[in-house]
Image (cartoon, helix red, strand yellow):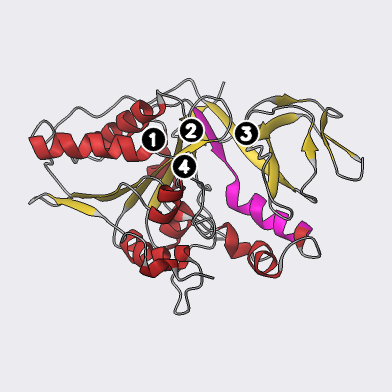
């Protein structure tokens, strides 16, 4: 493999530090190189801080406009691999993303709150990816759900989704013996920690974190969603001299509960599925290369359909309506 770490632009972060104590916030854009709405939103907010239109009155905020510069240059999701999986420092980096992780992970651990700005492949409305409820389990123990929920309902979108890491861990059990996966991918995709990305890493190191999916990759409104979410976060945390944003109360809360992997490169969807398309038990979702139909095992919602997924990787997820209260709000 080419040593891309020696020829690509360096990892770049920009810190604004108030002279008053306060929360340490970090905001990421372009963790996936073809998801540029966060980059545009960050650039707009930094320009306002530089011009004095916005004023930091407490704490500090660190911006990483292009978290994965190799993927960004290639205008694709990943450079050598998905940065938002298996995120952890390593003494033996292999892919370019391993080098980025060695710079990014200490930066995350030095902050209190993370806002990670993304977009998605197919059409749809923005939504927030929320972490687990408070728990003392072994997979993702957490004690800051109250603080995380309070921020989630103030970013702007009213659709909230949780259940990522435990669903991914269950998916690992289903791919352990999949011979279609390459040796390297098999090592990663059958490791439960491969489901750990930026937000999971942040929670594991004493902070709380949200992923905001701002819309479809090329949606012209997605950068505006990112920009408003950054302002709302800064105001909610008391870092800028603006009123705290009101919380959304008309919530739709879903929980991811199952992942289906692609078995063969020629497995195909029955139609161009969109995240949050409603599913009824028995609906035809797609057809495997060997002609076997893939049908919905239960009623629920399609999540993260990926028609270009490689064998052994996530093809789509199921989600269902959740009864979780978010910041004291019961979804309607």
Q: Is residue 139 left or right of residue 190?
A: left
Q: CA distance from mark 1 to mark 3?
A: 28 Å
Residue position marked by numbered label 3 in the rendering? 322
Q: Would residue 138 be seen by someone viewing this image from the given angle?
A: no
Q: Nearer the viewer, residue 91 or 310?
A: 310
Q: Is residue 105 above or below residue 229?
A: below
Q: Give yes or no for contact between labels 2 and 1 (Cβ–Cβ under 8 Å).
A: yes
Residue 217: image tag: 2
The magenta segment: 159-174
**First reached walking from the N terminus: tag 4 or tag 2:** 4
Indicate the position of residue 165 as horizontal and vertical percent values.
59, 53
Q: Nearer the viewer, mark 4 or mark 3?
A: 4
Q: Is residue 8 above or below residue 133?
A: below
Tell me if label 1 and label 4 are in contact, CB under 8 Å. Answer: no
Residue drawn at (79%, 29%), measured in percent from left and top?
270
Residue 139, percent across and down? Answer: 58, 61
Looking at this view, is 62 or 258 the one in front? 62
Q: Which image quarter holds the C terminus?
A: top right
Marks 4/2 in contact by CB < 8 Å: the verdict is yes
First-in-chain label (1 vs 3): 1
Q: Main secondary structure of the magenta part?
A: helix
Q: Position of residue 75 (x, y in %)?
A: 46, 44
* Residue assigned mark 1: 37
- Rendered residue at 8%/35% (across/down): 52
Label 4, label 3: how far apart the Cα atoms are: 30 Å
Q: First in sequence: mark 3 or mark 2?
A: 2
Q: Which mark is residue 34?
A: 4
Q: Which of pointers 2 and 1 lies earlier in the amino acid sequence?
A: 1
């Amino acid at each position: 493999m080419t040593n891309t770490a020696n020829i690509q632009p360096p990892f770049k972060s920009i810190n604004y530090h108030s002279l008053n104590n306060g929360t340490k916030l970090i905001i990421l854009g372009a963790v996936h190189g073809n998801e540029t709405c966060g980059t545009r939103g960050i650039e707009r907010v930094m320009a306002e801080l530089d011009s004095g239109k916005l004023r930091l009155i407490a704490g500090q905020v660190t911006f990483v406009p292009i978290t994965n510069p190799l993927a960004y240059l290639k205008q694709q999701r990943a450079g050598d691999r998905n940065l938002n999986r298996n995120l952890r420092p390593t003494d033996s980096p292999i892919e370019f993303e391993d080098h980025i992780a060695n710079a990014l992970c200490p930066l995350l651990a030095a902050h209190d709150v993370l806002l990670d700005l993304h977009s998605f492949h197919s059409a749809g409305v923005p939504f927030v990816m929320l972490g687990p409820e408070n728990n003392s389990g072994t997979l993702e123990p957490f004690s800051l759900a109250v603080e995380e929920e309070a921020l989630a309902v103030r970013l702007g979108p009213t659709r909230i989704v949780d259940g990522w890491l435990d669903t991914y861990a269950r998916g690992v059990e289903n791919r352990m013996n999949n011979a279609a996966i390459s040796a390297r991918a098999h090592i990663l995709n059958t490791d439960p920690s491969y489901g750990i990305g930026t937000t999971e890493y942040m929670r594991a190191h004493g902070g709380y974190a949200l992923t905001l999916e701002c819309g479809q990759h090329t949606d012209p409104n997605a950068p505006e969603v990112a920009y408003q979410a950054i302002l709302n976060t800064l105001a909610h945390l008391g870092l800028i001299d603006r009123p705290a944003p009101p919380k959304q109360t008309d919530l739709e809360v879903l929980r991811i509960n199952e992942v289906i992997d692609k078995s063969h490169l020629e497995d195909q969807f029955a139609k161009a599925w969109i995240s949050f398309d409603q599913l009824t038990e028995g609906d035809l979702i797609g057809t495997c290369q060997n002609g076997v139909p893939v049908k919905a095992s239960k009623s629920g919602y399609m999540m993260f359909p990926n028609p270009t997924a490689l064998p052994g990787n996530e093809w789509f997820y199921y989600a269902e309506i959740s009864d979780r209260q978010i910041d004291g709000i019961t979804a309607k």
